[in-house]
Image (spheres, helix red, strand yellow):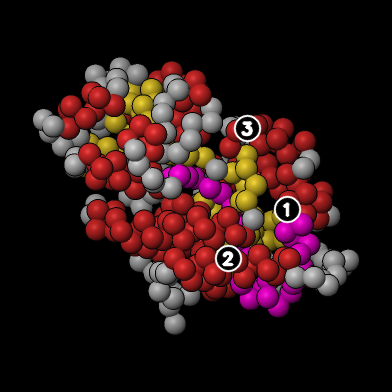
Amino acid sequence: MKTSLNRRRFLQAGAASGLVLATPGIVRAATFPERNINVIIPTAEGGGADRNFRAFTSVWKEKLGTEFEPGYYPGASGRVGYEVYMGKSEPDCYNLIFGNMGPEVLNWAMQEPSFAIDDYFYFGRVDTDPCCLFVGAESPLQSMEDIVNASKERKLTVGTSRMAHPASIGILALGEKLGIEFNLIPLQGGKGTIAGAVTGEVDFSVLTSGSVIAAGDSVKTLLVFGKNRVGEALDNAPDINDAYDMTLPEMLSARAFAIHRKAAEDHPDRYEVLTSTFKETFEDPALLKAYVAESGTPEYLNYGGAEECAEFMAAMLELGARYKPLLSGA
């Protein structure tokens, strides 16, 4: 039976996951892992999630004493990978999924999957990459004031990598606050979203900021849907909450490892090994080097456990349900 999208239920589930880790008397499983760990990545090989995965596991494998074997299942905005994981992977702690919590959780707000949503949970967040609003360097819109003024004359077009994305929610929330309507245009991935703004195909775009930083001087960032932790790298753009007196949760691209809830409950010793070594990986200086080598932004490398992940997942489901009519309109 499918599970309804309920914020309290997810927060409670996340707290329960934390208790599995904190339960006293769990003995570290000396024989785990006895074989490689399989990891489903619900996006294409060579993409941002894959680069992040390779950077993190290059250090994590030394703590676990085993290799990680990725399997790529792109399609339907990540939905295919989760369906394969929940439908075919054994819940034994030897099978994980590594995804981008923000847009992939929003899938379930748009259309519930074939499995119960709280039958899996994220236990290890690797990074938090805030979304942002940006224009092409040659755009006539060079400030948020320009965008607001232009919006009074016509409905502006906004490029986004996919409709159900935290960046899309960020601009919709801003429009709601200011009484402005925007026309969201899905441009199929980060490269297309940046190109749309640079070429003028759209008036401006919204995307995760790591990709915008990588675009360099071809773009100009005007607003961050969260804290600007990198200053000039995002043109010293302000936080949307500070600029417009809002209380929007950070709209993030947050990559994280997830596991079957049954696996954590049936094998708490194995789960403890996974979570403890995951956290140990963040204490190793080699991780930052590996992350940067894969084009990661150092300020975005950010540990999060099961409870932090559950809170973020619940927020995405709540906002996704709220903005569903607009996010599913294209």
Residue 273 shown left or right of residue 45 in the figure: right
Q: Residues within 10 Å of mark 1 (few under 14, many from 20)?
A: many
Front position in the image: 54 or 287 = 287
Counting residues from the N terminus, which is met first, the one under dot 3 or under dot 1? 1
Q: Give the numbered dot on residue 65.
A: none
* Residue depicted at x 80% and y 70%: 24
* Residue depicted at x 45% and y 30%: 212
* Residue depicted at x 73% and y 39%: 287
The residue furthest bottom is 1
Q: Secondary structure at mark 3?
A: helix
Calculate the distance from the C-alpha at mark 3 to the C-alpha at mark 2: 27 Å
| Amino acid on which disc 2 is placed | Gly
The residue furthest left is 153
Where is residue 26 drawn, in percent x and y?
81, 71
Callout 2–callout 1 Cβ contact below 8 Å? no
Calculate the distance from the C-alpha at mark 2 to the C-alpha at mark 1: 17 Å
Where is residue 126 drawn, in percent x and y?
62, 47
Number of numbered tags placed on the structure image = 3
Kindly identify which residue carries mark 1.
278
Indicate whether residue 266 is drawn in magenta. yes
Kindly identify which residue carries mark 2.
14
| Amino acid on which disc 1 is placed | Phe
Q: Residues within 10 Å of mark 2 (few under 14, many from 20)?
A: many
Counting residues from the N terminus, which is met first, the one under dot 2 or under dot 1? 2
Q: Within the image, what quadrant is residue 106 found in? A: bottom left
| Amino acid on which disc 3 is placed | Pro
Q: Which residues are magenta?
A: 250-276
Q: Give the numbered dot on residue 298.
A: 3
Q: Is residue 112 above or below residue 182?
A: below
* Residue depicted at x 62% and y 32%: 298
Q: Secondary structure at mark 1?
A: helix
